[in-house]
Amino acid sequence: MDEQEKIERRAHVRLIVTEALMFLSVILLVGFLTLVVMGYSFNLRGIGGAGDVVERSGLVQMSSIPTGATIFIDGEAPLLLSTNASRTMIAGQHEIIFKKEGFDEWTKVVDVTEGLMYRLNYARLFKTEREKETILSGEKLVRFVNVSPNHEKMVIVEGGKMYVLNLNENKPEKKLLDVRNVNGASIEFKTINDAEWSGNSERLLAKVNGAWVAINLRDEKETVWISEVLENCATKQGVDDEGSAERKCDKIVVSDIKFESEAGDKLLVLDTDGEFFEANIREKKLSDVLLEKVIRFDNDGDKVVYLIDSENAKKKEESMLDDGLAIKDNSKWQVRAYRVGEEESFLIAGTNSDTLIATMQYFQDSYVGVVEEEGFVIYSKNGWFTSNDDAEIVFEEKLETRTASIKKRGKGMVFEFKDEEGGTKVFDLEAMKTTAVNAEKTGWIDEYLRYRLNFETGELSVLDYDGLNERKLVNSGVMGGRAVTISGNNRWLYYFTSDESGEKLIREKVN
């Protein structure tokens, strides 16, 4: 073999080796990326016998108000990682701290589950040095203060008149709402309670002077007294002896009423006879009876869960046997799912004790919280319930005390329930666990943050929905029995104080 042939053979061998290495590299890279996509990561500390080298991780999405905080994970600040950010973390508990110059710090221990995502999207940091200003002063006889869910509007009833305040404005001023009764005369607000806001915060549903009214805050001339809608006749299910549809007129007494639509132009009404209606306040029309024998209900938009007597449900379903709709359930009551406008409802759970219910949407999933004497159960479904076998139990827990109420909080992330002895628990969908909270003398300052007030000194502190991260904000002087809130644009903290000249509305710049 001459020298030229040896050179060519060596070149051929190098080419084969190079191609083989490239092929193996592609295989390893694809395998590595596949593991990363599946949630696995490489633990360098595991090399040398300290633990597993390849471990499955979870993804944590982190954000804070304000943005731009440095994130510390288990005491370390990874390079180029600041909010808002996402990071894979090995399954288990991790301490996450947000720090930003000029602000206090926020910390949380999260329990990361392999292959799942944890959304840490409610951290709030406050300026350590804050400007303070008086927005309203000399206010007297304030009977009612209420803040919209988006924290952009505050309603104040003072001296028999209602005012609305835009909390996002640089110089907010009270706007008088000239609310008129059905005869066109201006009303005096003597009593107001049971207030609920529409999703877009443009309407306030409340019981004013003993009568239900949907107040249009943008244009008070569009305010509607609910009696005007309920006095419209609605067709009642069934027929009379002469074969014509029965009519229901002027007999509806409201047991419960809630907004259905985001714009607040549609309501869901339950009367004291257990009949369930949809009311269109823009057109001042009442629907036919949608459901019967309803004990209580909750809704998220047009998605409704309700409690019904099982015997009544069975009687109705026996007539539907040919359509395969009958339910075989021996429970005393049923929790059912219904979507307004559809003909069918679907069984979620049977229950033999008085039951409290709440529902919410969290991203693409529906959740129903059911509280009985013996425990708390969460049912879930991707999308909305469309059959009797849809509901999946994702959490259940025994309760030691009887629950008095259950509500959704945190933009559909938290169920809060209170027992008859005054105790409070929250169920966190991200952590999938309940936590007992010391909720004494607390209220909600935004969707995820509570405030605690010392009634004797007026000291104000804030804490997360689960009772953690309690931090002092105001040393003294904050008035009890009034709203404390952060504006919708996250710039100002509002609270009331009081002295011999009357009440004052104060705000501090927190961001």
Image (cartoon, rainbow, N blue to C red):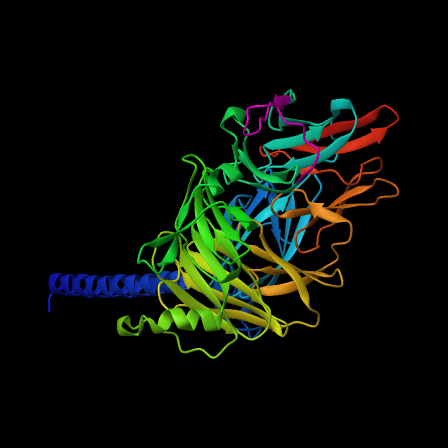
Which quarter of the figure has residue 73? bottom right
* Vertical order, 266 against 465 (above or below): above
Task: Give residue 80's position: percent from left, percent from top.
Answer: 53, 44
Task: Give residue 246's position: percent from left, percent from top.
Answer: 38, 54
Residue 177 part of the magenta-drawn span: yes
Quadrant of image for the C terminus = top right
User: Which of the pair 252/382 is nearer the observer?
Assistant: 252
For image coordinates 80% across by 36% down, the residue present is 478
* Vertical order, 218 against 116 (above or below): above
Which quarter of the figure has residue 417? bottom right
User: Which of the pair 437/106 is nearer the observer?
Assistant: 437
For image coordinates 18% across by 61% down, the residue present is 11
- Answer whether residue 343 is visible to the viewer in this image: yes
Q: How many marks?
A: 0
Residue 80 part of the magenta-drawn span: no
User: Which of the pair 185/442 is nearer the observer?
Assistant: 185
User: Which of the pair 478/311 is nearer the observer?
Assistant: 311
Task: Give residue 242's position: percent from left, percent from top.
Answer: 32, 58
Quadrant of image for the N terminus = bottom left
For image coordinates 83% across by 41% down, the residue present is 459
Left or right: 376 in relation to 460? left
- Answer whether residue 54 is visible to the viewer in this image: no
Left or right: 50 in relation to 437? left
Q: Which residues are magenta?
A: 175-192
Task: Give residue 436's position: percent from left, percent from top.
Answer: 70, 62
Dominant secondary structure (helix, strand or loop) of the stretch shown in magenta = loop
Left or right: 253 in relation to 502? left
